[in-house]
Image (spheres, rainbow, N blue to C red):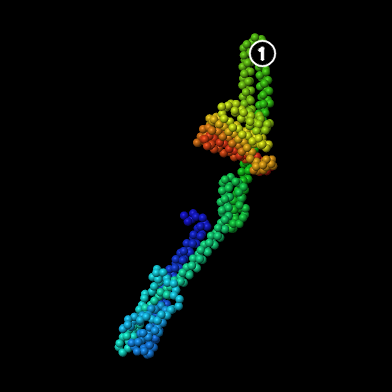
């Protein structure tokens, strides 16, 4: 789990962990040392207290009667550090020492700490006796509490210093790691852009440590060659479509200019033969000639159909919008019972023939599919030029686009859809002019095709020239 984390978090958590362990070990060592230190300090305190008591007692014995020695001691003895003194008078019980403050009393340590460092308490009793009579005792008990309180104060100060240092170093490390890893965030964002198809994503050689710089530069080189390959692919794709269009155009011309007149001549000749045979009373020949006439008429009809399929006559001769109107008029005639919504932007700028053909084929194939597979009540077609301003389209700005939508309220695309020749060719053509096709369901379960096409192609043109040279 730790290994899978962000490096930043790993470093900060790792350092925090080490500092916690160090703090714990330090605390154990401090407690052990404190116990010894308290014991030694208290012991030495007890020794000097004993010396003080013995000296004071000696002086008092010489000054006063033995029975008055203890009350006298109560007046003159000053309670030393680390020792509790009790004066036990054989006649009057315990005497209190005159109240003398021993300086500021430090805050007491909490119980758990006292128990950890508390040395064993020892009591010493010095008897006050003269001529074989015991008048009482001076009892001295070790009192380590104020020493423990002092140690506790040191320990807490040390703790706060160490904790502050730990927090500061964690924050500093976190900032440092964050700053040096920031290029990785940029890299992640750039990779996402690449995945989403934006091949212009670059990192530049902004910042980054020496370890990261080659990776960032490598990314830029990679995305650059990817973009180049993609552009070349688009150019080739477009070339293929253009060549196909040209090929179909020349076949259409051949059919129209050569086949058309020949078929016409054939029909005229057959009709002449039929007429002549009928006049000469040759009914059998007349019938044969009529048969030839009807075969020629069939060939002419399929020739006309072939011509329209190969190349819509209107394209390249009338504006795209007019060609599309004719197309939908023809559909309306064959399917008059449907609810047709045709909305074509009349302000479309002049578009190249390859684009006109792409738009025309899109609506042609899409509508044919809807009629053939969808069984719809309503078909809506829409074409709009999204130029921002018309000027932009005229100057060939990259952002000028054409948006096409075709919607039907039929049965919708089958769930396990395998695109046939029609949709595949549509997608290829649209891709070849730098566009993008999205097939989706409508709210009522029908089919919606949406296309966005760039109105200009400066990048492609540059690369095409390079490829051609
Ligand atoms: N508008 C539509 N409504 C319902 N199904 C559709 C529609 N358009 C396409 N399809 C489905 O997608 C399939 C592929 O279409 P297409 O690639 O044009 O091939 P074809 O029309 O030759 O079958 C069709 O066979 C049909 O099942
Ligand atoms: Mg089809």
Local SS, label 1:
helix
What number of labels is visible? 1
Relative depth, front residue between 408 and 209 = 408
Q: What residue lies at 67% left-to-right and 37% top-to-bottom? A: 349
Give the percent coordinates (x, y) of residue 386. 63, 40
Relative depth, front residue between 185 and 332 = 332
Residue 351 figure quarter: top right
Compared to residue 237, the image places residue 253 above or below, namely: above
Q: What residue lies at 63% left-to-right and 37% top-to-bottom? A: 384
Q: What residue lies at 54% left-to-right and 38% top-to-bottom? A: 440
Give the percent coordinates (x, y) of residue 301. 62, 23
Residue 261 figure quarter: top right
Relative depth, front residue between 116 and 255 = 116
Mark 1 lies on residue = 275
Q: Is residue 448 left or right of residue 27?
A: right
| Residue most extreme to the left | 132
Give the percent coordinates (x, y) of residue 173. 54, 61
Relative depth, front residue between 410 and 297 = 410
Q: What residue lies at 60% left-to-right and 46% top-to-bottom? A: 198
Give the percent coordinates (x, y) of residue 333. 60, 26
């Amino acid at each position: 789990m730790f290994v899978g984390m962000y490096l930043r978090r790993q470093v900060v958590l790792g350092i925090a962990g080490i500092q916690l362990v160090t703090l714990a070990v330090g605390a154990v060592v401090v407690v052990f040392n404190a116990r010894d230190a308290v014991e030694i300090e208290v012991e030495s305190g007890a020794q000097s207290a004993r010396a003080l008591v013995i000296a004071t007692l000696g002086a008092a014995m010489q000054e006063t009667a033995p029975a008055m020695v203890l009350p006298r001691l109560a007046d003159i003895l000053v309670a030393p550090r680390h020792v509790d003194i009790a004066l036990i008078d054989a006649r009057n019980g315990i005497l209190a020492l005159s109240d003398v403050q021993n300086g500021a009393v430090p805050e007491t340590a909490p119980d758990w700490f006292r128990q950890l460092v508390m040395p064993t308490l020892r009591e010493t009793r010095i008897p006050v006796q003269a001529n074989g009579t015991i008048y009482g005792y001076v009892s001295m008990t070790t009192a380590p509490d104020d020493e423990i309180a002092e140690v506790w104060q040191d320990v807490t100060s040390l703790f706060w210093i160490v904790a502050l240092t730990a927090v500061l170093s964690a924050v500093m490390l976190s900032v440092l790691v964050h700053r040096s890893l920031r290029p990785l965030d940029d890299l992640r964002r750039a990779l996402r852009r690449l995945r989403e198809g934006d091949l212009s994503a670059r990192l530049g050689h902004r910042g980054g440590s020496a370890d990261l710089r080659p990776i960032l530069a490598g990314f830029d080189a990679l995305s650059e060659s990817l973009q180049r390959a993609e552009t070349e692919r688009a150019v080739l794709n477009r070339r293929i479509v253009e060549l196909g269009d040209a090929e179909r155009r020349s076949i259409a011309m051949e059919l129209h200019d050569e086949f058309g007149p020949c078929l016409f001549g054939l029909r005229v000749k057959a009709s002449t033969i039929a007429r002549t045979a009928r006049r000469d009373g040759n009914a059998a020949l007349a019938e044969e000639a009529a048969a030839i006439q009807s075969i020629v008429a069939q060939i002419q009809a399929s020739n006309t159909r072939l011509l329209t399929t190969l190349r819509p006559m209107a394209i390249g001769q009338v504006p795209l919008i007019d060609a599309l109107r004719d197309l939908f008029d023809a559909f309306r005639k064959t399917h008059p019972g449907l609810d047709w919504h045709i909305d074509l932007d009349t302000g479309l700028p002049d578009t190249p023939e390859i684009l006109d053909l792409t738009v025309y084929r899109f609506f042609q194939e899409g509508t044919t599919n809807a009629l053939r597979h969808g069984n719809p009540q309503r078909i809506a077609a829409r074409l709009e030029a999204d130029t921002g301003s018309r000027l932009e389209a005229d100057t060939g700005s990259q952002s000028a686009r054409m948006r096409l939508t075709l919607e039907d309220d039929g049965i919708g695309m089958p769930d396990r859809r395998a695109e046939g020749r029609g949709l595949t060719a549509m997608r290829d053509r649209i891709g070849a002019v730098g566009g993008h096709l999205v097939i989706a369901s409508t709210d009522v379960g029908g089919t919606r095709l949406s296309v966005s096409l760039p109105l200009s192609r400066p990048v492609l043109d540059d690369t095409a020239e390079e490829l051609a040279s």
